[in-house]
Image (spheres, rainbow, N blue to C red):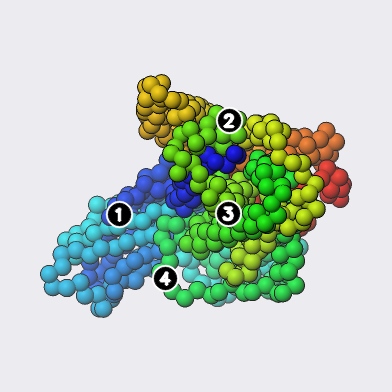
Amino acid sequence: MLLHSLQRLLHALLLIAASALSTGAGAQISLKTSATAGSSVVTTPYVQAELVAHAPEGVGPGQPLWLGLSITHQPEWHTYWKNPGDSGLPTQLEWQLPEGMDAGEIAWPVPHKIRIGSLANYGYEGQVLLPVPVTVSGAFAPGPLAKEVTVQLQASWLVCRKECIPEEGHFTLQLPLRSTTALDAAAFAAARQAAPQALPASNDGSSSARVQDGALVLRVAQLPAALRGQALEFFAETGSVIETAAPYTQAWEGAVWTARIPLSSQRSASPEPLPVVLAHGGQGWRAELPVEGGWPALAAAATVSPALEAALRANAQLGNPPAPGPAAAPAAAPLGTWLVALLGALLGGLVLNLMPCVFPVLAIKVVGFARHAQDTRAHRISGLAYTAGVLLSFLGLGALMLGLRAAGEAVGWGFQLQSPAVVATLAALFTLIALNLAGVYEFGRMLPSSLAGLQARHPVADAFLTGVLAVAVASPCTAPFMGASLGLTATLPAAQALGIFAALGLGLALPYLLASWLPAFARALPRPGAWMQTLRRFLAFPMLATVVWLVWVLGQQTGIDGAAALLALLVALSMAVWALTLRGTARWLIAPLSIAACAWLAWNWMPNIVEIKEHQAQPAIGSGAWQPWRPGLPDEIVAAGRPVFVDYTAAWCVTCQYNKKTTLADAEVLADLAARNVALLRADWTRRDPAITAALAQLGRSGVPVYVLHAPGKAPVVFSEILSASDLRAALAAL
């Protein structure tokens, strides 16, 4: 019988998979920090950050105290000023200080302009100290026996070269109360020297800013006489006001410095007054210029790297979760919107039955139909049990995903196949199923008859577990109509969100449920006979094809060594199962050796299977070829006037691979993309990536595939999951 051998093996392996889901999902997101509890230094591959202090007279009320974050960058890497420029994010410091100690704002040193293509950022390279003045009031009371005070800092920064890495660290430093802390006195003195000096306020109108013909016309007086005639660097403290990368003109009118600086076409701020910094030779001067005539109307707010900001927020939650407290409940969707989402999920579940990854599991049900062709009652009970397994599994996965999101994890639909442990477990499970279908083993030849007959005595449990298995492999196969419905779940209350998951499960189970309750379908099936054994053995090959796909997915996550290790383990597992079917002396000789070999391989090679390998650096790719996506890159390309097409994909997504081999390989589509100079970006979600998850959330999606066309001055176009060449070409023609 088909499933005699699966009852116990399915149950055990699915429990293992469920455990991997709950533990592996969270284990693969890690902050890029090497700080340990109580450390004042964080070292990453790109920076070394250290919490330092300057307390020349000890720590007490009224005594000077400075804290600061010292950042030493690797060559070519940089972090950002308070106004990062065209892209980036400023370094953020969150202090945890004893009562009576209050930290001020960062005394930002003068930055320098960092050009990246057609963009310009403001930031720091090499070594920089971000000093913060601390006021110690009379409320500071460490106790009569205290000898030192502990200060803590939670810092986050964005470090960039051509790519950007969000990082953070938790720092702890003990300061003596009564002795001097002055080892970094020179560094703090240099930082104070590098901070811009405030210019005296101009009451005679000699310093001002005026908007004229799309530009800012600036006049700055009270500058040191030694600067007259010198070319100065200009930095606006407020972002999204000027064209950062654009050239500007400057001149001296006696003692007054003047400049004409292009105003940003996407200006989203109207500061009053306008704070600016002028610099020369490493020194800076700050002025707050009154704006004459007022600001013109604002342009639509530009959204610079929203996915990156969301990824940083996710990283901050992971590293420093907020204190528990009442949170605002998501607003319920209007009834009409929710009903449309339910319909979309139901249709998506129906389409899932046509997906290649689901077919091997449905094949089990085909044989089950044939075995009970004349037993209407058995059909109906099996249909209900299968439906229950599908529904409960979808609800369980949905609840787990919503729970992980609520805990700060950046996960989306299909997250279980981002865990190599889950992929390897499913590969082992499908190998065992294939071996059973091929007739390699039967429970009756491996275990006592009392255990071998479990499936016969518990057909309901068997049908239920088949439904669970169907969901395990079907959920990553995103089908049409699913994307928007699943994306909506992130914004809905739990009850409405789980309703969408239930509708998706009902769609997957509905064809089999209806067939089990329609007598005409049962009567149309042929009578049981020898053909069933032939069909059973044939169905082993779709199972083995699924194993090939899973091994390929694992290879994308862990590399060729991981895929090879999994194949070796599958061979050893197959040999061990075969050895248990032997009789007499052969069984007692071969089976223990086979099982021992399988255990040895698992013990020694499992790290190769479950350890995710870092992406290899890719060379620069020319026009017309796919480039790897990174946070902020689409914004940068669009800002330069070029359209962008982004393919959000994953190796375990069958629909993604279909679209990649058809529409995205179509000669006419590729010609249209090249003719319009469209940049092609591919966001690979095969492995956990909080930035990609955040980008998908910004688009209202929860899984892949997702295809987006960005163009200057136009709203992004999001295409259907089954990508049509005609739809894509029509969108390109409209550019």
Badge 3 is on which residue? 460
**Quadrant hosting residue 715:** bottom right
Q: Earlier in the sequence, mark 1 or mark 4?
A: 1
Of labels 1 and 2, earlier in sequence is 1
Mark 2 or 3, nearer chain start: 2
Mark 4 sits on what residue? 324
Q: Residue at x 72, y 74 (%)?
A: 335
Is disc 1 surrounded by few (<14), some (14 to 19) or many (20+) residues within 10 Å?
A: few
The local crowd at label 2, few if under 14, some if 14 to 19, many if 20 or more residues have their Cα within 10 Å, is some
Which one is nearer the viewer's eye here, 230 or 79?
Answer: 79
What's the CA distance linking mark 4 and mark 2?
55 Å
Three-letter residue code for mark 1: Ala
Identify which amino acid the numbered label 4 is placed on: Pro
The residue nearer to you, when weighing 386 against 710, is 386
Q: Which residue is mark 2?
A: 439
Q: Secondary structure at mark 1?
A: loop
User: 10 Å neighbourhood of mark 3: few (<14), some, or many (≥20)?
Assistant: some
